Image (cartoon, rainbow, N blue to C red):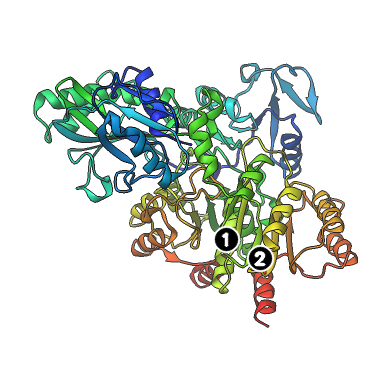
């Protein structure tokens, strides 16, 4: 399945809970980046506006269906908000909140999947398709159009990587923060099928991290992927048994450490880079002139 | 959040899962006699391997006070679980967890109960939907090859009940090891439960488990939690002020690639205030005051939070608190963060305050730090 935002950037975006201080800043950033926003969903504020963006009490009040939703709903309401969007058949759903309870996400991610929706997050800065639009806060000024699909498990590292790529003259097809939780809407390997078909993608840069086993599923999927993949895993020197920020970033077994993951990715055919700088050097060699 | 055995078993008992009869004992509580002449004393700590450390002992009730003192000598003052011994015919292993990659509840079963599962043969694994009316049959099919049919059926009937507990109690992991086969049925003799920390507020407080988790932290880590951010202290020579898990780990890796070790790692914490820069700097300066720590590294990427606010916070803090070791500073600010106050403005503002080492590239910053320390 092709992630819908790769096929065509959304044209009718709704934003849930846009009026908080953090969310309002993101909404302003998205509109500045040219993201076509049609309404904000803010219970109790229906009929009002946020910088000319009409506010509705409920998604049900939206007259023409949205093709993307970005959620700044607080963690305890995020699961329900995702399920509302799934029930409405919104193809792209981006859930920003960190600290969404795991079982809420599990249920919501299953619902989104069953409805054929593509959920990014929770715990995500979203995605930027340089030159086209922004869903979330992957800073467009850090990005530039190009042919590398950047997939990151960490928000700050995705931002940093996009900025370093741009500084090195390597543009991005997309820069996407997949989400830092143990359960996220779509796992890294699920992006490969769409990126394989996407004519705008020449190579993939995957920035993983310690904890969990998503990199093993990615490694398994690499055999069928026809384009070069460069992979890094942050936390090569992280101590075991300590949670390093993200809910998922904890080395419980050697298999969850960076060395084991990098080995698996290397064996599967990925070009493994220890640092972002090594990744850039590899990409320079791999990208068609 | 890891639950102690006593909290885990109390939770299971509440849901009707069989666990041994027991009482919770403090360090000096009298030993009750209603559990029988022989009992099992178990120290309530979070680490595994209690048996090997002498922290799980079967003994005559009369000997319990002395045994308890022996255990306190090893663990310090903790709570104890005093249990009625169980007549074990066979020990099984059964665990349920959330598999983030398959987005399913995953069950693991082995007939090698009672030992560390990593040392046993690979367990049987299957996914379970607690809403599936045939969840029992699915589980039966997964364990039938390893057990006689009547026992396989008993295990299979237990699994969907546990899956519902996993969900209702917001658990990431529910591990019964051993799950004992007894004349009275299946009994969970030991239980490791891990609750999703994002969902802790939905449930009653578990003071013993919470206190043990807190006791495992260093004083500075504890203070950081109270001030709304997560701190991990490590043996190292550079006090790192980081924000964001991935970037923080990347900085830690870059330092290590230059022969240096981060003495700290920082990230946001649930319920913390929007900005904890000052509290993070305080913690880093406290770490940097130690003789083995040689420098402070502060690096942050700002997507939309205003750069000006961050710089002013930093300058105000530095005016009151001179850094105990050389401070290496880096910022990368996106357009939205630098509106009206860009990197150049930040640089000149910081330069005017006497801070020269300012880079927007993390590698350059780490290199500068490493070069200076090597000189």
Number of disc labels: 2
Q: Nearer the viewer, residue B183 or A11?
A: B183
Residue A37: horizontal and vertical position, in percent? 70, 33
Q: In the rendered image, which quarter is residue B64 located in?
A: top left
Residue A88, x across and y down, in percent:
53, 22
- Chain hosting mark 1: B
Residue named by callout 2: B362
Q: Indicate whether B253 appears above or below B80.
A: below
Q: Position of residue A39 (x, y in %)?
A: 70, 27
| Above-or-below relation of B127 to B23 | below
In screen coordinates, is B181 left or right of A153?
left
Q: Which residue is mark 1?
A: B250
Residue at the farthest bottom position: B375
Are the residues at dot 1 and dot 2 in contact (C-beta closer than 8 Å)?
Answer: yes
Question: Which element carries disc 1, helix, strand or loop?
Answer: helix
Of the numbered discs 1 and 2, the one sitting upstream in the chain is: 1
What's the distance in space between the residues labelled 1 and 2, CA to CA?
Answer: 9 Å
Q: Residue furthest left?
A: B148
Q: Looking at the image, which is closer to me, B123 or B126?
A: B123
Q: In the displayed structure, would residue A161 be above or below residue B13?
A: below
Q: What's the residue at 77%, 53% (across, down)?
A: B335
Q: Is residue B105 visible?
A: no
Q: Position of residue A185 (x, y in %)?
A: 48, 37
Dot 1: few (<14), some (14–19), or many (≥20) neighbours within 10 Å? many
Q: Can you see residue A262?
A: yes
């Amino acid at each position: 399945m092709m992630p819908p935002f790769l096929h065509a950037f959304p044209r009718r975006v709704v934003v849930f809970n846009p009026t908080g201080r953090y969310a309002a800043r993101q909404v302003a950033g998205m509109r500045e980046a040219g993201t076509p926003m049609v309404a904000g969903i803010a219970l109790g504020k229906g009929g009002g506006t946020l910088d000319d963006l009409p506010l509705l009490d409920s998604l049900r009040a939206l007259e023409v269906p949205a093709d993307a939703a970005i959620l700044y709903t607080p963690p305890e309401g995020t699961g329900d908000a995702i399920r509302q969007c799934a029930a409405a058949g919104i193809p792209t759903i981006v859930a920003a909140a960190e600290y969404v309870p795991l079982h809420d996400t599990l249920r919501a991610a299953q619902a989104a999947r069953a409805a054929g929706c593509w959920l990014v997050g929770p715990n995500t800065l979203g995605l930027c398709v340089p030159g086209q639009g922004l869903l979330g806060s992957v800073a467009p000024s850090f990005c530039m159009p190009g042919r590398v699909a950047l997939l990151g498990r960490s928000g700050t590292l995705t931002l940093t990587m996009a900025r370093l790529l741009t500084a090195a003259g390597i543009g991005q097809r997309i820069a996407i923060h997949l989400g830092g939780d143990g359960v996220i809407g779509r796992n890294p390997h699920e992006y490969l099928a769409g990126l394989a078909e996407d004519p705008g993608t020449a190579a993939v840069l995957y920035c993983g991290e310690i904890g969990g086993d998503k990199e093993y599923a990615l490694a398994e999927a690499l055999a069928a992927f026809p384009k070069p993949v460069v992979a890094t895993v942050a936390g090569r020197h992280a101590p075991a048994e300590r949670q390093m920020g993200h809910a998922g970033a904890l080395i419980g077994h050697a298999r969850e450490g960076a060395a084991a993951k990098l080995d698996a990715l290397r064996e599967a055919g990925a070009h493994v880079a220890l640092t972002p700088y090594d990744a850039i050097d590899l990409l320079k060699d791999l990208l068609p002139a | 959040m890891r639950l102690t055995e006593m909290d885990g078993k109390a939770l299971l008992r509440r849901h009707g899962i069989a666990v041994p009869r027991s009482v919770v004992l403090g360090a000096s509580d009298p030993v009750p006699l209603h559990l029988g002449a022989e009992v099992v004393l178990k120290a309530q700590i979070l680490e595994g391997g209690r048996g090997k450390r002498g922290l799980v002992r079967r003994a005559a009730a009369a000997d319990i006070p002395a045994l308890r003192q022996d255990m306190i000598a090893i663990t310090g003052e903790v709570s104890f679980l005093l249990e009625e011994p169980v007549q074990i015919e066979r020990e099984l292993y059964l665990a349920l967890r959330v598999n983030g990659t398959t987005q399913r509840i995953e069950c693991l079963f082995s007939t090698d109960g009672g030992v560390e599962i990593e040392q046993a043969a690979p367990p049987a694994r299957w996914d379970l939907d607690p809403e599936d009316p045939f969840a029992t049959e699915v589980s039966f099919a997964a364990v039938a090859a390893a057990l006689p049919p009547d026992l396989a059926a008993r295990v299979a009937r237990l699994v969907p009940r546990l899956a519902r507990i996993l969900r209702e109690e917001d658990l990431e992991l529910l591990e019964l090891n051993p799950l004992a086969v007894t004349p009275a049925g299946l009994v969970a003799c030991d239980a490791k439960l891990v609750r999703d920390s994002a969902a802790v507020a939905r449930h009653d407080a578990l003071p013993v488990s919470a206190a043990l988790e807190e006791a495992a932290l260093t004083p500075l880590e504890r203070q950081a939690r109270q001030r709304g951010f997560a701190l991990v202290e490590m043996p190292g020579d550079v006090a790192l002020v980081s924000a964001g898990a991935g970037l923080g780990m990347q900085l830690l890796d870059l330092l290590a690639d230059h022969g240096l070790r981060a003495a700290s790692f920082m990230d946001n914490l649930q319920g913390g205030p929007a900005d904890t820069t000052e509290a993070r700097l305080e913690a880093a300066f406290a770490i940097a005051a130690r003789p083995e720590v040689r420098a402070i590294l502060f690096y942050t990427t700002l997507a939309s939070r205003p750069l000006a606010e961050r710089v002013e916070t930093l300058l105000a803090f530095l005016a009151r608190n001179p850094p105990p070791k050389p401070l290496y500073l880096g910022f990368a600010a996106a357009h939205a963060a630098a509106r009206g106050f860009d990197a150049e403005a930040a640089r000149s503002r910081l330069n005017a305050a006497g801070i020269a080492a300012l880079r927007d590239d993390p590698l350059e910053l780490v290199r500068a730090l490493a070069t200076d320390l090597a000189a």
